[in-house]
Amino acid sequence: MIFFSLIIPTYNRVHLITKTLESVRCQTFKDVEVIIIDDGSTDGTGEHINHYIQKHELRGWYYTRTNNCERGAARNTGIRMATGQFITFLDSDDLIYETHLQKAHDYLSSKEQVKVLHSAYEIQTHNGTRKIHYKKTLLLNKQVLDGNLLSCFGMFIQKAVFDQTMFNENRKLSGSEDWLLWLKLSVHYDIYLQNEITGCLVEHSERSVLNFTPVQLRERASMMREQLQNDTGFMHKYGQKTVTNIYAHMLSYGALHLILSKNKRQGVYLFGKAVSHNYKELFSKRTVGILKHLLF
């Protein structure tokens, strides 16, 4: 049985995806199938990927095209196709370093009780790279309640886990469907940390997180709150206060991105709403960024 299934959803990334595919092709660990889900691209992405696979004679690389249904649905399509023991993901504009899969394999092989693993990563910006700061702990279950610090490409999840839950496919939740899944998984599974950086999230002006309207950001936060409130396991373990804090966190996150997009009025409104639900948002690092971009 193949050890890893690596699922790559993509949409109109023909000008970015080659570097991502190269980072996969250069992995030192080879017991992996690569499943690329083209979510209805219109820029020639499919032709480019097929040419890449044929050019490099890549066995175990599969390409399929679906109607545009957003990332949650695309990843779920890949999950249903997957045959590996563990499933992991990679967005088509991010990069994994050559020992990414090897390090995860070594960790999972040495700790057979682990069903959910997160490998550390960094963020690449035009000013260089910055690290993600994890609390000094073996498990990330509590830290994931404070924000979505887990990258999709850093997550390694036993395939059987997806028999119970998969990504939410509602478009209104797009951009947070991954965090919702991590939150749901944290109720039933320990999320282990492999604290060695093995990949990077690449920041650029086309990242989809920057392209949401105020209405979409509010709806996304409300849907996240609704999904968690309807999850009896989550409510039993964490309670309404945690749900409210997550809701406030999403509102302040939306506020920052609106302000970065020069929509200061709506950003301030959303930030005020966040603080009204959890005053501690005032003392977060995000508030410093909000104030900085409001004043300068």
Image (cartoon, rainbow, N blue to C red):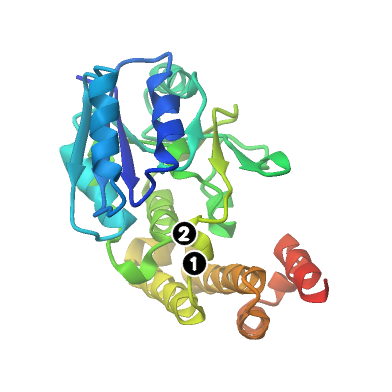
Residue, disc 1: 211
> In this picture, is 29 found above or below 37?
above
Q: Nearer the viewer, residue 205 or 7?
A: 205
Percent position of residue 7, x then y? 31, 38
Residue 157 in view (yes/no): yes
Residue plotted at (49% across, 70% down): 243
Quadrant position of the N terminus in the picture: top left
Separation (CA) of disc 1 from disc 2: 5 Å
Q: Nearer the viewer, residue 225 or 50?
A: 50
Residue, disc 2: 208
Give the residue type at disc 1: Asn
Percent position of residue 52, x then y? 30, 28
Instruction: Look at the numbered disc 2 and give the secondary structure of its residue.
Output: helix
**Is residue 97 found left or right of 288 in the rendered image?**
left
Percent position of residue 200, x then y? 56, 36
Quadrant position of the C terminus in the picture: bottom right
Residue plotted at (40% across, 30% down): 114
Residue plotted at (39% across, 17% down): 109
> Splitting the image into 4 quarters, where does residue 177 fall?
bottom left
Q: Nearer the viewer, residue 252 or 95?
A: 95
Q: Are marks 1 and 2 in contact (CB under 8 Å)?
A: yes
Mark 1 crowdedness (10 Å alpha carbons): few <14, some 14-19, many ≥20: some
> In this picture, is 138 found above or below 288?
above
Mark 2 crowdedness (10 Å alpha carbons): few <14, some 14-19, many ≥20: few
> Splitting the image into 4 quarters, where does residue 72 fall?
bottom left
